[in-house]
Amino acid sequence: MVDDSTLFHIAERFGTPTYVYDLEAIRRQIVTLRGVLPDADLRYAVKANPCGTVLRAVAGAGVGAEVITAGELERALRAGTPPERLLLGGPGQDRDLITRAVEIDIGLVSLDSASQWELWRDRPIRSTRFLVRVNPGLDPRTHDHLATGAASSKFGLPRAEATELAADVAKVGLLAGFHVHAGSQVSSLDVYDEIFALLIDLYAGFSDLALLNIGGGFTVPCFPFSGFAERVVAFAERFGLRIVIEPGRSLVAEAGVLLTRVIHIKEGERRHLIADAGMADLLRPALYGASHPIRLLGGGRGEPRAQDLDGPLCENADRLGQDVLLPVVDRGDLLVVGEVGAYGYAMASNYASNLRPAEVVVDGPSIALARRREKPEDLWRLEGG
């Protein structure tokens, strides 16, 4: 990761709060994932981090992209991802998005519903092939907001409906396989055992299928990729399939940090560090109760004690960490919030007319501004009148 002297330099040069991404760390993670699953087709989940510089680095490493909106599709194309390496998914495929996907002859589409197929089936399909997304109806052992494979979630179809849709797509020779995504921050391999048990009957019911999209959502840090790979490879070999995976968080989360400066300190029963970054810059702690590693840049002095790292907004949920063990922290000190390369800036907002932070990329000795910090005039740039 980026060393402390470089982070100090970035904070002085670009100010705070600022996201910093290590492109070499992302490339190393791609190599690691390919080492575990050498035959898998990697499609980066753009929603994790859509920064153009990051997307170009991922595309330059030969990784495809998974997109769910018109904006993500255009970002991926702009970054150099070939249309045949794009996978369009998500529950919201509308007529305009489908028209654009047909226009570029997109490679893969994951159908989330029969309703989506009705919008696709009469289009002039050339090379595009389709997956049917299955809702496995299981407990992914994760936060409710991340449990996309739960029976109550909006994603995919129960087995009977998925089979019916798959048969309809197969009639016109466009079915490539099935897609299952258990959830995000999934750490239990038992979840995948349940998924593969469900998929056996689905794949046994169709001939000549080529793909299984097992999704992404692998927990960070320390997902047991070796055990996962054993299960994936065994299933793929049984049915002669190529595996598609959609890594997002697992490629970029640990490659990103958020630099924030302490602007006030409130002593009392709890010690509150009021920083210049908060929930409008990093929403995950407020939205998911997510915990990110936080440290004082440069080390510090004194015995660590529990302190709250709070943001500057008038919301009690505006907090990046609670009971964080930190040494003596003074006003003006810099803190580093780790594992924010995924779903950090991507979820940042202008709530309370917050100005979204800068994004900086480090690539070996090179330091470059990937996105400038917003200015007040950016807030009303798109307004009329």
Image (cartoon, rainbow, N blue to C red):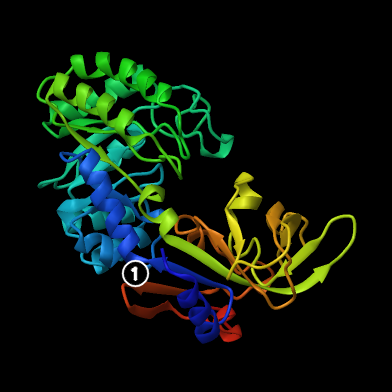
Q: Nearer the viewer, residue 30 or 125?
A: 30
Q: Is residue 264 left or right of residue 269?
A: left
Q: Which residue is mark 1?
A: 52
Q: Is residue 72 above or below residue 214?
A: below
**Residue at image location 35% in from the left, 59% down from the top:** 72
Question: Disc 1 on helix, strand or loop?
Answer: helix
Q: Is residue 227 visible?
A: yes
Q: Position of residue 57 (x, y in %)?
A: 27, 65
> Is residue 105 something that shows in the picture?
no
**In which quarter of the view is residue 216 placed?**
top left
Left or right of residue 129, residue 283 in this image: right
Residue that extends furthest to the front in the rendered view of this protein: 302
Image height of 293 relative to 280, above or below: above
List x then y, in percent, for residue 15.
56, 82
Q: Residue 17 falls in which quadrant of the image?
A: bottom right
* Left or right for 4, reference 299: left
The one of 367 and 80 positioned closer to us in this rendering: 367
* Vertical arrangement, residue 184 with respect to residue 229, above or below: below
Q: Quadrant of residue 281?
A: bottom right
Q: Amino acid at mark 1?
A: Gly
Q: Give x and y (percent) for residue 148.
A: 47, 34
Q: How many residues crowd around disc 1 within 10 Å: few (fewer than 14), some, or many (20 or more)?
A: some
Q: How many marks?
A: 1
Question: In percent of the image, x 18 and y 56: which residue is there?
Answer: 62
The spot of residue 67 in percent (x, y) is: 33, 52
The quadrant of the rendering that contains the C terminus is bottom right
Give the quadrant of the N terminus: bottom left
Q: Residue at x 58, y 52 (%)?
A: 292
